[in-house]
Image (spheres, rainbow, N blue to C red):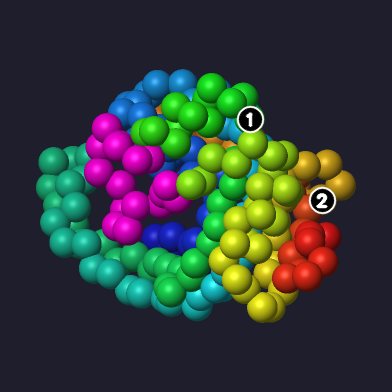
Amino acid sequence: MEFRDTAALPSKSGVVGLLANALGRRRDEPVEDLARLRMGVAVLRPGRLLVDLQAVLDVATAGGGTKNKLTRRRYLMDASFLVGLEGEGETLVRLHRALADPARPLPSPPPYLPDGLVPLPLEGALEKKLGEMGLSRPVPLFLEGEGGEPVLDVPVDFASRALAPRWVRRGVWHPKGGAL
């Protein structure tokens, strides 16, 4: 039986893949420019993990026949996140435009904030957007940078599914006291 897992947070690979799709890039095109962006995630609603068994019928085999395959998959359900990116201004403007008017369809509702371009470092931009949301409770933060835990989710090549590590540190945003 095949098992497909999921993480409790958006992965860098997933975010970069979504951005590459919005730009109209193919799976075999380079994504180094997008992978270099520094990423932060605020967990607005953690969601729940759901396990699903799926039967895939008539899977082609190497010998020319078919077989049935059972897969077990985990999904994250009812979660909500605010993802911030830090990088060169021109790149961020191009990505903001691509999310507003994607080259290919994106998930619904689209992962786009009309006023999402904030000329601040990543932590400050996330703090500003969280403050504007009027939240009254602390929000867990996961910020890319030194001093954290290694996470293997930076896309090197989508065609081969190759990944590289990055460092992610945990923090908390407080409604009246900022982050960390």
Residue 95 location (% of width, % of height) = 45, 32
What amino acid does circle 1 point to?
A: Gly
Q: Main secondary structure of the magenta part?
A: loop
**Disc marking residue 109:** none
Query: Earlier along the polypeptide chain: callout 2 or callout 1?
Result: 1
Rendering coords of residue 24 (x, y %): 31, 28
Residue at the disc numbered 2:
148
Instruction: For residue 75, say whether it is visible.
Output: yes
Which of the two discs, 2 and 1, sits closer to the camera?
Answer: 1
Q: Quadrant of the N terminus?
A: bottom left
* Secondary element at image label 1: loop
Query: In the depicted view, which residue is nearer to us: 173 or 18?
Result: 173
Please give left or right for residue 2 compared with residue 105 in the image.
right
Closer to the camera in the image, 122 or 31:
122
Which residue appears at 68% of the width and 69% of the height?
Answer: 139
Of the 4 image quadrants, the one containing the C terminus is bottom right
Quarter of the view holding residue 135: bottom right
Q: Residues within 10 Å of mark 1 (few under 14, many from 20)?
A: some
Task: Write the start and end of the magenta stretch as one range.
Answer: 99-114
Magenta stretch contains residue 46: no
Which amino acid type is shown beneath numbered disc 2?
Gly
Q: Is residue 4 above or below residue 146?
A: below
The residue closer to the viewer here, 78 or 158, is 78
10 Å crowding of disc 2: few (<14), some (14-19), many (20+)? some
On residue 87, the disc is 1
In the rendered image, residue 107 lying in the magenta stretch gets the answer: yes
